[in-house]
Image: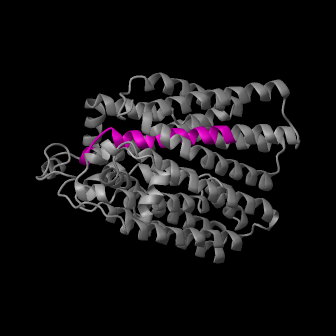
Amino acid sequence: MTTTERIHARLITRDLDAEAALPEPVRRDVPRNSLRLIGANALQSSGDQTVSASTVLPWLFHAIGVPAALTGALVPIRESGSMLPQAFLTPFVVRVRRRKLVNVAGALVQAAAVAVMAITAAVGSGVVAGLVILAALAVFSLGRCLTSIASKDVQARVVPKGERGQINGLATTASGLVAITLGLAVRALGEGLDAQTLAAILGLGAALWVAVAGVWASIREPVTLRDGASAPPQGPDSDEADEGQSWFAETITLLREDATFRNFVTVRSFLLVSSLSPPFIVTMAVQAGAPALTGLGGFIIASGLAALLGGRVFGRMADRSSRRLMMLGAALASLVLVALVVVDTALDLAGDSLLTYAIFVGAYFLVTMLHTGVRVGRKTYVVDIADGDQRTTYVAVSNSAMGLVLLVVGAITSAIAGLGIVWALLFLAGLGVLGVLSSRRLPEVEGAA
């Protein structure tokens, strides 16, 4: 047994029956490719921590004097920009025989965009610097869009069912360590977190994405005509269909005619409970008197601990039943939000007390950890639910649909928050309950279910 195989055996619980169904060359490279997938995903997640639209970039905008109106555009550009173009770009991606090359290109685009942000942070200020960073963030999101489409496809080509969730979980765990380190650094720097320091953090992020590109390039991906097909496929992914049917019409057709996929997109929309609620918890903490900078460092540490503790456990759970993991995560996240609202109302939390801070950080930790489970379960489910180019189409169309849903739900939640943060949290908790109920219609896709 080689060193790679020994490390793989320690990290991954192997599904030998699923591996036996793979072609012999692919089966032989499973340990090597698995470790590289973990490395690529971990490096990418680490890079995300250095250019977070919820933490690092808002601090940077404050440090270089960017108006608050531009700060409000960071998260929408980052999230929707990486989702909305996916259905449009999918026909181009499925023509690439080696999908890992799409990931290499996407990683290099992200590296270049973050490098522009770092340079701007070091030498720029004011509105112009803010606009340049927003433009670079849009390009960054386009690069992420490419990797989002192709990365799950590469994973499904080189790793069997029963092992994919563990890979996602291990990568999440590794990114948690980075988040803890960054959070500790933020708390240590305190008010010394100036533009030059943040520019250095962004420069580190650019280097991480160059490393991501190198790891993706080293994966041994089987070369096939169309993800295992010996002839061009028929249906919406074929060249004739590309000429006769627009990507938008294809998206609508898929959502209308594929009941399983439509249910998955519906459930994923309700799962926003765990992704949209953390910023509101932070806002409640600030309103209650938590210190703006050092307090935020505590939330970053909580986020890292959640990923560190939840990644490995949720990865194994996803390989047993990704559907049940999504249901459990949504249900418990809703319960935490309701409990926080009840505690806040009953105790009338206020002031910069240790109890107040502990309650909010604890709630943030629990919701973030549950979001880790929801995210790992969702990513594993969409990889396991389909085969070949249909999988690529599922990933792209679901992400494009979610880009629109995110804008709509985000706008509704923000409007409700105008009436009070607790009402926004209760609205999101209600979405989570709907997600649990809707998940019952999804079929199990893991062999152990």
Residue 355 included in the magenta stretch of the image:
no
**Residue at point 66% right, 38% down?**
366
- Left or right relative to 66: residue 43: left
- Left or right relative to 396: residue 334: right
Residue 248, horizontal then vertical, whole percent: 29, 44
Q: Is residue 311 visible?
A: yes
**Residue at point 67% right, 30% down?**
336
Q: Residue furthest bottom?
A: 123
Residue 158, horizontal then vertical, whole percent: 32, 54
Residue 386 included in the magenta stretch of the image:
yes
Which of 337 and 158 lies nearest the eye of the viewer?
158
The magenta segment is: 365-390
Which of 405 and 282 lies nearest the eye of the viewer?
282
Q: Quadrant of residue 333?
A: top right
- Left or right relative to 105: residue 95: left
Residue 423, horizontal then vertical, whole percent: 67, 28
Position of 278 relative to 438 (above/below): below
